[in-house]
Structure formats: structure tokens, C-alpha cells
Image (cartoon, rainbow, N blue to C red):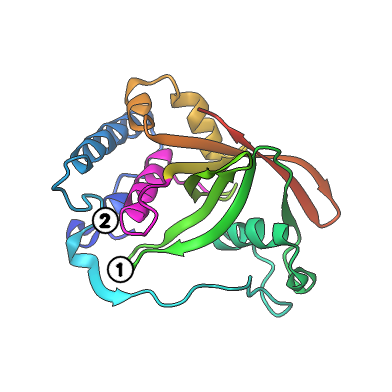
Amino acid sequence: MDSNKEENHFKDMETINHRNKDDYLENFKKLEKKINDAKNPRAENVFVNKKLLTDKKHVGSHIECSMNEKDSPRITEKRICRCMYYYNKKEEQCNKCPLKYKYNNISKEYDIIEAEIPTIKVIKKCGGIDLVISKKDDFNVKYAVEVKPKYSKETLVRMIAEIYTYTAETEFKKYKKAIAFFEGSKQDEDYEKYKDEAYFKNVIKEITIFKFVEKEINKEVINFDIVKLN
């Protein structure tokens, strides 16, 4: 991570993934201030370093998973999110996918309706919204979600900072902001550790937290549920 503050967004600040309690709580405090600053109607995206903004627009979008038998089977955040979206569409292309496991959503409450939505304009050192989740019984309720794979050691602070960063620079500003992590992950442990801390409660007032719970693994398929925690 670049330690040069002039070249970082808030989500990339030098200490944002520090896991010791003092730094974790201090970063919750900093995040709370940023969230409050962002509520100023005249404020621009306070989570983005203006020096990293460009005028170049993202063009097009993925219309298929793009995984094929020549690709590495390595699990990544992007591949998990694409799989959660495309596998549940029952794409024929899944037959050529090299991933050891596919992700099958068995939730009775939530659908995954889109994946990998970029910012409107290219922003250096920025990705986009990982998933869009909707309620099955109310399609008007949609969540823009930042996701971390089970092996990730990134903090909840960074996840929340990321979703604030990306939603402010997409057409999905009105979607509910959310993060999602896997049961048994570092983020799951952190949630249990900090959920009663005042600073944490303050920063999640407008954030929905989901947990992916792996219910069963059948040969090449992981059946997972989507559980809302707050």
C-alpha cells in the first residue's frame, strides 16, 4: 500500500488495515468523521483523493463471466463475485470454468442481481461495487455491496470506506450501502469483537452487514445463504 498520503484515497490510508485494537478503534473514529463530512450537501466525495480523479469514462460492462478452462483456478474476490452472480443464472459457460467450487445462492430472502459495477469515471486506485443484492419479496430494496473473500485480512473499516467511495461515484447512489463477508473470516471475527463498540455502532448506522454462510458443499458447488446481521 502506498504510504504517500498525496497519492491515497481514504480507503488506502496507511493504517486502515491495522488489526490491533487501538488502531482499529481510532480508524472507526476517523471513518465516522468522514461519514459525517460526506453528509454536507455541498461536499464532494470526501473519500476520494481529487488528484486521482480522471475525465475518462468507463465504457461497456461484462456481459458474461469470461472464465474459461485456460484460466487459473485461483479464487479471487472478483471471481467469487462473478460466480455468485453468473452461476445462479445457470450460464452454460460454467461448464468450462476452472474454479474448484461454484457459488450457489440458496437464500430464501435475497437475490444477487448484478456484479462488478464500475465508477462512472475512471478513478486511479479505485474498483467498483462488487455485488448488488435485492430482497426477493421487494425488488425495490437494493443493496450496493462490498465483498471480501474468506482469506482476506482487510478490516471492516476499509470495507465500509470502500463502499462509501464507490457508491458516491456511480449511478447507484440511492442504493443501500452494505458490506458482506464469509462466516469464519477475519471480518466475521472482527464483527463479533467490535459490534458493541460505540464507534462501530456509529459508522454502521447507514450500513447493512451481510454474512455469507456456507451450508453445504456438493462436489463442485458451495451452497451459501445470505444472512443479514443488523
Q: Residue furthest bottom?
A: 70
Q: Which residues are magenta?
A: 152-175
Report the disc number at residue 9.
Answer: 2
Q: Measuring 50% from the left and 45% from the top, which residue is drawn there? A: 142
- Is residue 166 one of those drawn in magenta? yes
The quarter of the picture where the N terminus appears is bottom left
Where on the picture, by quarter, is residue 5? Answer: bottom left
Q: Residue furthest left?
A: 42
- Mark 1 burial class by Cα count in 10 Å: few <14, some 14-19, many 20+: some
- Tags 2 and 1 touching, CB below 8 Å: no
- Comparing 67 with 12, the one in front is 67
Q: Is 76 on the left-hand or right-hand side of 24?
A: right
Q: Earlier in the sequence, mark 2 or mark 1?
A: 2
- Comparing 31 with 56, the one in front is 56
Amino acid of disc 2: His
Q: CA distance from mark 2 to mark 1?
A: 9 Å
- Residue 84: x %, y % from top left: 65, 55
Q: Which residue is mark 1?
A: 124
- Residue 199: x %, y % from top left: 32, 26
- Comparing 23 with 169, the one in front is 169
Disc 2 on helix, strand or loop? loop
- Residue 192: x %, y % from top left: 52, 25
Where on the picture, by quarter, is residue 195? Answer: top left
Amino acid of disc 1: Lys
Disc 1 on helix, strand or loop? loop
Q: Measuring 49% from the left and 73% from the top, which residue is drawn there? A: 61
